[in-house]
Amino acid sequence: MRRPLLYTVAALFLAYEQYAFYQWMQQHGTVAAGLSHAWMTLHQDPMVFMAWNDMGLFTALVLTWLWRDLKKTGRSFVWWPATLLLGCPPLLVYLARYTHPEPSTHD
């Protein structure tokens, strides 16, 4: 049950990301205009800035864990840039494809 659920959530989240990007482009017209708006929003709202920093730290932690797990298990490092660029969907697929018999420890 766990694998199909992770695959389904990954597919739905990827579709959601694509739809959100489409809406963002419709709203702003160009990537440059969208990034300019995002930058202004970050500087105008301290809570948005705090949430952005929190997501950045969490992303760094996840990518560090993933790097170490890939190195320890000898799996393809393609998962790392895929997760960096696409976010949760590749990570969910990775978790669905590869299960550890024991909790992963990196001592």
Image (cartoon, grey):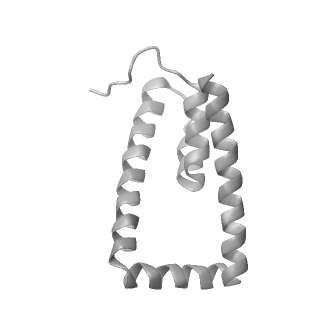
Horizontal side, residue 103 vs residue 4: left or right: left
Q: Residue at x 66, y 74 (%)?
A: 24
Residue at image location 40% in from the left, 35% down from the top: 68
In the picture, the quarter occupied by the C terminus is top left
At 66% across and 83% down in the image, what residue appears?
28
Position of residue 21 relative to residue 58, above or below, is: below
Q: Is residue 61 left or right of residue 14?
A: left
Residue drawn 71% across and 53% down?
15
Q: Quarter-wise, where is residue 17 in the image?
A: bottom right
**Relative to residue 20, is residue 86 depicted above or below?**
above
Looking at this rendering, what residue extends furthest in the top direction? 101
Name the image quarter holding the N terminus: top right
Q: Residue 2: x percent and y percent? A: 59, 25
Image coordinates for residue 84, horizontal then vertical, percent: 53, 52
In the rendered image, which quarter is residue 22 located in?
Answer: bottom right
Residue 76, how many percent across, how many down? 57, 33
Q: Is residue 32 above or below residue 80?
A: below
Does residue 23 appear to the left or right of 92 in the view shown?
right
- Residue in front for this viewpoint, 87 or 23: 23
User: What is the tally of numbered marks visible in this picture?
Assistant: 0
Q: Position of residue 80 (x, y in %)?
A: 53, 44
